[in-house]
Image (tube, coloured by chain):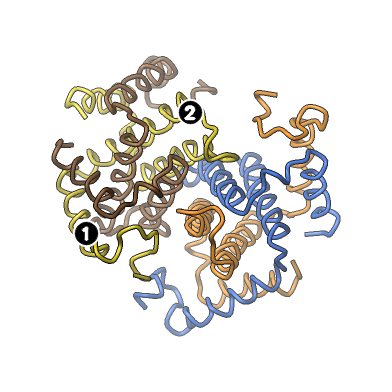
Chain colours: A orange, B blue, C yellow, D brown
Amino acid sequence: MKEQTIKRILQFTIDRDWDQFHSPANLAKSISIEANELLECFQWSDDNYDVEHVKEELADVIVYCVDMLDKLNLDVDEIVNAKMDKNEAKYPVEKAKGSAAKYTEL
Amino acid sequence: MKEQTIKRILQFTIDRDWDQFHSPANLAKSISIEANELLECFQWSDDNYDVEHVKEELADVIVYCVDMLDKLNLDVDEIVNAKMDKNEAKYPVEKAKGSAAKYTEL
Amino acid sequence: MKEQTIKRILQFTIDRDWDQFHSPANLAKSISIEANELLECFQWSDDNYDVEHVKEELADVIVYCVDMLDKLNLDVDEIVNAKMDKNEAKYPVEKAKGSAAKYTEL
Amino acid sequence: MKEQTIKRILQFTIDRDWDQFHSPANLAKSISIEANELLECFQWSDDNYDVEHVKEELADVIVYCVDMLDKLNLDVDEIVNAKMDKNEAKYPVEKAKGSAAKYTEL
């Protein structure tokens, strides 16, 4: 994401004085709520979805993720790479290839 | 996020031949599931959370968002800016400032 | 559900002195968290699920619903019938039959 | 819940020929979606919620739970009691009393 887009997201909150509502817990709730508006696009069919609606709801999830990264002063590349280190260790290619099994079952 | 981090996320899926499981509907489910693992960090307390755990679960949400953007060939800046256009129209500063009310109640 | 089962659920909380954690907001989070553990049974496949696991996660959702009904002193038949009144009005049989469309689109 | 209320819920689906949409996976999605509409009642405040709205959203969660029990031919008392057996074993009173810690940390 461009720095400019991130700034726009954060400025939106500042302009409305909404930082007071953006506790980490409230942002976690918000990410789940938006994730479920995204899920609603697929509620009754996996294949027959409105991509315009999907784009809006996915954007909402991402916006709150940016808010949470900012709130907790986290670097997105740092936390994602740290998690990918773990994921790669939990799901070694030779065991996980082509399997949807959870790592505890591999 | 750096291009390199995005590539790492996508390569992880390619290496394991997991694209077959990554339908948009399954990715939407996954985003919600990970969002709720994040929410679990705040299940019984808003203030007493383990930031290391939060980082991991937030990273998982972001990873699946990247997968979904890729799956649907979406440009993150484009969809986020399009949604911010809407949000700014729904929540004009003069009405929304300092209020947690939903736009339908403003 | 039998009165005896409901009592067992509520006694479980009393015995552990957990009522202090069971604010309506925390119970709402808990219902969502358990609902997503249920959803995880279907994360990568709609058809290939472990029914024993489904039973456990569905039970967890129901347990927290019982806790919330109790916390807010709600009568389950009353709130469900009130909502069914609304659902029947929103989705008249002649319009909704065989359609998965949302009521706003009927 | 009264037998009559359960019948009303199931008849609602039959009348609209919606059983075709009620796969276990779709019902799991629906439970999560409704759980998050419930969570939205507490999005920005734990204490300042609209109890009428809470009643409606909690009812929706319960309605889909009833649908899922029916779909999978499950007995609610059986699955809840089986899960309570496990919960009581995982959270022995002497260890869990007054603590919000997860059983893995007790």
Does residue B27 sit above or below C35 in this rendering? below
Which quarter shows the N terminus of chain A?
bottom right
Closer to the camera in the image, C28 or B7: B7
Does residue B90 sit above or below D40 in this rendering? below
- Left or right? Give the position of A27 relative to A71: left
Note whether residue A23 is visible.
no
The x and y percentages for residue D91 are 42, 19
Protein chain holding label 2:
D
Label drawn at residue C97 = none
Can you tell which quarter of the image residue A47 is in?
bottom right
Q: Residue at x 66, y 30 (%)?
A: A101
Determine the residue located farthest toward the right in the rendered image. B4
- Left or right? Give the position of A20 relative to C78: right
Q: How far apart are marks 2 and 1 (CA)?
A: 42 Å
Which quarter shows the C terminus of chain A?
top right
Closer to the camera in the image, D73 or B43: D73
Q: What residue type is labelled 2?
A: Ala
**SS at circle 2:** loop
Label drawn at residue C88 = 1
**Are the residues under marks 2 and 1 on the same chain?**
no
Protein chain holding label 1:
C
Q: Which residue is drawn at 61% across and 62% down?
A: A67
The x and y percentages for residue A61 are 58, 60
**SS at circle 1:** helix
Report which residue position mark 2 lands on.
Answer: D101
Image depth: mark 2 or mark 1 in front: 1
The x and y percentages for residue D50 are 27, 59
Note whether residue A4 is visible.
yes
Circle 1 Cα neighbour tier, 10 Å, few/some/many (<14 / 14–19 / ≥20)? few
Q: Which residue is drawn at 38% across and 64% down?
A: C102
